[in-house]
Image (cartoon, rainbow, N blue to C red):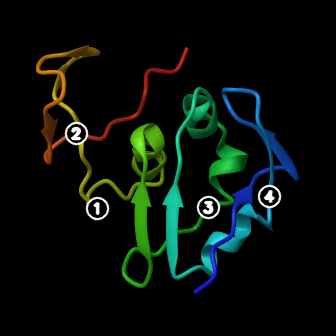
Amino acid sequence: MEAFITTPTPVVRSMNGVEVTGQRPMEYVTEAEAVLIGSGVKTRDVVADDQLISRLSLEPSRQLVGTQCSGALVLARLGLRGELSAQGPVTRGDVPVRPGRWSSRARLSRPRLR
C-alpha cells in the first residue's frame, strides 16, 4: 500500500511553519482506498471555502475515512456526519468538562463562521 500527502496547493505551511509539499492534488482523494483528514488552525477556513470543499468527494461505503481532531469538521461540512462516527473531548460549548476524557458520541456541527 502507498500513502500520499494531498494538498490544495503545491506547498502548504503547517501551524508551526513547516513547509509541506503535496505529493498529489486534493482530487486524488476520490481514487484513494483510505483517506485521513488532518486538522490545523485553518480548518474553519477550509470548511468555509465552498470551492475547496467541492474538490473533496469521499465515499465512505468504499473508502476507509478518518480524521484527526478538527478534521471532523470537514466530514460535517461534506454532510458525512450521519454516516461516520467521531470522537472528541467531552465539552460543554468550547469548555472541556472532563479533560482527558473522550466521548464516542461527540456531535459534529458546523463551526460558527464570522
Residue drawn at point x = 40 percent, y = 61 percent: 66
Side of 9 relative to 110 (left or right):
right
Residue drawn at point x = 46 percent, y = 75 percent: 59
Tell whether label 2 touches label 1 (CB within 8 Å).
Answer: no
- Identify which amino acid the numbered label 1 is placed on: Leu
Q: Quadrant of the C terminus?
A: top right
Quarter of the image where one finds residue 24:
bottom right
Cα distance in 3D space between marks 1 and 4: 26 Å
- Identify which amino acid the numbered label 4 is placed on: Gly
Which label is found at residue 107? 2
Cα distance in 3D space between marks 4 and 3: 15 Å
Cα distance in 3D space between marks 2 and 3: 21 Å
Q: Which residue is mark 1?
A: 84
Residue drawn at point x = 74 percent, y = 54 percent: 7
Side of 19 relative to 90 (left or right):
right
Q: Which residue is mark 3?
A: 56
- Identify which amino acid the numbered label 3 is placed on: Leu
Label 1 crowd bin: few (<14), some (14–19), many (20+), radius 10 Å: some
105 to 17, vertically: above or below: below
Tell whether label 4 touches label 2 (CB within 8 Å).
Answer: no
Q: Which residue is mark 4?
A: 22
- Identify which amino acid the numbered label 2 is placed on: Arg
Circle nearer the viewer, 2 or 4: 4
Circle nearer the viewer, 1 or 4: 4
Residue drawn at point x = 28 percent, y = 64 percent: 83
Mark 4 or mark 3: whose residue is earlier in sequence: 4
29 to 99, vertically: above or below: below
Mark 2 or mark 3: whose residue is earlier in sequence: 3
Quarter of the image where one finds residue 3:
bottom right
